[in-house]
Image (cartoon, helix red, strand yellow):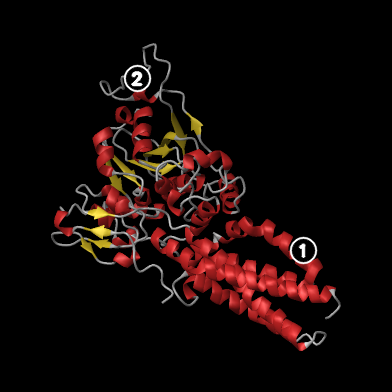
Amino acid sequence: MDTHTTAAPPCCTSPPGRALPSCSCGTDNPVPPEIRTTGSQITFANRLDHCLARWGINRSGHRVDPGLYRLGSPTPESPVFASANYTLSFDALRSALAGRDAYILVLDTKGINVWCAAGKGTFGTGELVRRIEVTGLAGIVNTRTIIVPQLGAPGISALEVRRRSGFRVEYGPVRARDLPEYLMTGKATPEMRRVWFPVQDRIVLVPVEMVHVALPAIIIAAALWFIAGPVAALAAVSAVVAGTVLFPILLPYIPTRDFSTKGLFLGAVVAIPFAIAFASDPAQPGWARLIAAITMLLIMPAVTAYLALNFTGSTTFTSRTGVKKEIFRYIPVMVCMAVSGIILAIVLGVNRLLGVI
Amino acid sequence: MFDSYTKNTLRYYEDRCINCKRCSQVCPHSVFAEGPEKAELVNPAACMECGACALNCPVQAIEVRSGVGCAWAMINAALRGKDLDSGECSCGGDEVSCCGVQEEKSTCSEGK
C-alpha cells in the first residue's frame, strides 16, 4: 500500500475555533486523530493484490487501515468520500479521483466490498457515524456533506446519519469511474445509478468460483478415474467447469430465468457427448451402455445446476425471495437426479465387480 | 414458467410519499423512478430486496424484507439446521465474501 501516516495531527492545522474538543494540540490529551496520505496511482503491488483477491487467496486480508485519508492536497473545502477498507473498493475510488484533492473516509468493513458490507450492515449508519467521530472529521473539513457510494445505501440511513453526525449523505454513482462526470455535473444520470452484470464482471468471478470447488472436484475426479476410468473422471471435471466457468460467462444466454433450470440445461448439453460416448461403447452389452448413458444425463446436469444455483449470491440482481423459491423448487429435483444417478452407477459397478459386464 | 423472481416483498404506499427522490437515487435496478409529484414504482419485479430504498425513505412509504439472494448462504444455514433467513453469513456480490472465514463469523452475523 502506498500510504503513510502524516506526523502532524490534523486538528493542529485546522482553522482556529474548529479544533475538536478531543484535540491534543497544547493539551495533555494523548490521542490525536491521524490522517493518512494516499495517491491515485495504482502500483504493480496493488495490481498483484487485486489479482490475489480475485483468486480468493488470503480472502479476508485485502484490507486498508480504516480512517481518514488525504488524497492530493485537500483543504477544509474539499469533498469527502466514504469507502470500504477493501483494497479493490478503496483503489477504485482513489484511482477515479486522479488529479483531485479530497478526503477519503475508510470505514471498517472487515475487508469486504461496499455492497456486500452494506448488506451485512458493516458498511452502515453506525460505523459511518462512529468513523466521522473518531477521525474528528467535523473539525477538519468545513463541508458537512459526505459522498457515499450508491451501493452503500442498503446499510446507510441518510436521515439517521444526518441526525447523529450532522453530515448530509450524498449518494454518488454506483461505479467510482463515473465520479469525475458526477463531480462535474453534480448529478448522477439514471445510467450511473444502474447496476449491470456485463461479461467482464462475470468473467472476473470465475477464478473464485473455481477455487471454491476445486478441492472436492479434484478428489472426486481422481476417485472416479480409478473406479470407472478416465472418461468418468473427465465427466466430473466437465460438470464442475460447466457450473463454475461456462455458467457465469454464458449466464444471460442460457434459456429460462431460474438459475437452476439454466444449470440443468447447460449441464445436459455438456452431458450429451459423454452419454453418447458411453452409449456407443462396443465393449459393453446394450443394457449396460444405456444405464451408463442415463447415469451421465442424471448426475452431470444435477451437479452443474447446483453450482449454477450457488452463483446467485455472486450476481447483482437475485432477490432473497426468488432464491428461496428456487431452493424449494429445484433442490429436491437435483437431489432425486443425483441419487438415482448414483444408484445406477452403483448397479453398474456391482455388475462389473461380479464379472457380469 | 421457470421464473422464481416475479414476486418479492417490496411494498410501496404511494399516499405516504413526499417525493424526496431518495428511492430512485439508491435503487440499483430502476425499480423506482422520479414522478412529477410522487415516486413511481415502475419495475417492481426487478427488485432484489437490498433494502436501500426502505432504509432511506424518510416517511416509511416503502417496505421490503431485505436480505441477500445467496443460495450458498441459505443452503449452508439449512444444512446446519438453521432457518434459511438466519443470515449468518452471505456471499459476496461481485467480490470477496466472508463466507467460510472463521474469524469473521461474529461480524457476519451483525446487522441483517
Residue A47 x/y as whole percent = 57, 49
User: Where does label 1 land, which residue?
Assistant: A223
Q: Which of B31/B109 is in front? A: B109
Amino acid identity at mark 2: Ser
Q: Identify the residue under disc 2.
A: A22
Asked if A220 appears above or below A33 in the picture, the reply is below
At 42% from the left and 50% from the top, the residue drawn is A115
Residue A303 percent location from the top left of the image: 61, 68
The N terminus of chain A sits in image quarter: top right
Rendering quarter of residue A246: bottom right
Question: Could you tell me which secondary element the residue under label 1 belongs to?
Answer: helix
Which residue is depicted at the point 43% across and 27% down?
Answer: A34
Element type at marker 2? loop
Compared across the picture, whether A347 is left or right of A139 comes to right
Q: Determine if residue A334 is in view.
A: yes
Residue A242 in sight in this render: no
Image side of residue A113 versus residue A75, left or right: right
Q: What numbered label is drawn on residue A68? A: none
The reply to whether callout 2 and callout 1 are in contact (CB within 8 Å) is no
Residue A161: x and y in percent read 28, 38
Relative vertical location of residue A6 with respect to residue A3 in this rendering, above or below: above
Q: Chain of mark 2?
A: A
* Residue drawn at (36%, 21%) of the image: A12
Image quadrant assignment for residue A129: top left
Marks 2 and 1: same chain? Answer: yes
Q: Which amino acid type is shown beneath numbered disc 1?
A: Ala
- A192 sits to left or right of A312: left
Mark 2 against mark 1, which lies toward the viewer? 1
